[in-house]
Image: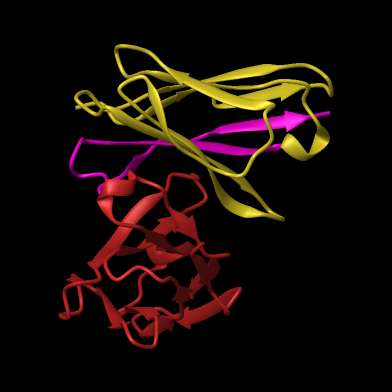
Amino acid sequence: AQTVTQSQPEMSVQEAETVTLSCTYDTSENNYYLFWYKQPPSRQMILVIRQEAYKQQNATENRFSVNFQKAAKSFSLKISDSQLGDTAMYFCAFMPPETSGSRLTFGEGTQLTVNP
Amino acid sequence: KAGVTQTPRYLIKTRGQQVTLSCSPISGHRSVSWYQQTPGQGLQFLFEYFSETQRNKGNFPGRFSGRQFSNSRSEMNVSTLELGDSALYLCASSVEGLEEKLFFGSGTQLSVL
């Protein structure tokens, strides 16, 4: 079974600064997907960024980028130029190969607060 | 295009009752999955349905069940409610072949008193 661990329950950052959220996972699969989701107080789960394990290049989406270290099973999220609207709970998640359907394993979450 | 719709948004039940939650996926999405979110256990996968068949199942007791209709709408049912079933229940849908592109609904907040 896969496990996902987020060791930072809470983090805070000043507006316009950069913050990195950590995530490690454990799996015996060689190909899989990794995700970072954002859950604001509205409770809607919003996809921030997705990484396919067979792609060595780190995914980026505007101010969001990941550092994917497959051998170390590490998948951190960097948020640049933090904005007040980035305040939310962030979840790291793992999905096995698509032939298994869509089954996500989530980490415990990191509550990020962006301060003005 | 409408997003994933979950009804109701809030629900209050008492122990021992049963409850049915509904999820309407995005048009064209045939896969629907359900998750339970609690402060203690976090986000946990319940089950996934595709073309009216359960494709994946999480580690939950038999009190938790689901089904999917021919129009891809899904329902989940919890019988003999317990206090620990109080949670946010999230539904997600995806297109066949693009299961990694999940779209989530806003959830149903269930409170068991």
* Residue A112 percent location from the top left of the image: 51, 71
Q: In this view, does A14 lie to the left or right of B79?
A: left
Q: Give the range drawn in magenta.
A: B86-113
Q: Is residue B32 visible?
A: yes
* Residue B42 percent location from the top left of the image: 62, 55
Q: Quadrant of residue A95?
A: bottom left
Give the residue drawn at x 16%, y 74%. A55
Q: Can residue A115 be seen in this view?
A: no
Give the residue drawn at x 47%, y 53%. A40
Q: Is residue B26 left or right of residue A12?
A: left
Q: Quadrant of residue B58?
A: top right
Say if the magenta span includes residue B98: yes
* Residue B65 percent location from the top left of the image: 58, 24
Vertical arrangement, residue B62 with respect to residue A56, above or below: above
User: What colour denotes chain B?
Assistant: yellow
Say if the magenta span includes residue A98: no
Residue B64 versus residue B93: which sits nearer the camera? B64
Vertical arrangement, residue A111 with respect to residue B70, above or below: below
Residue B32 versus residue A30: which sits nearer the camera? A30
User: What colour denotes chain A?
Assistant: red
Q: In this view, does B68 lie to the left or right of B30?
A: right
Residue A83 versus residue B11: which sits nearer the camera? B11
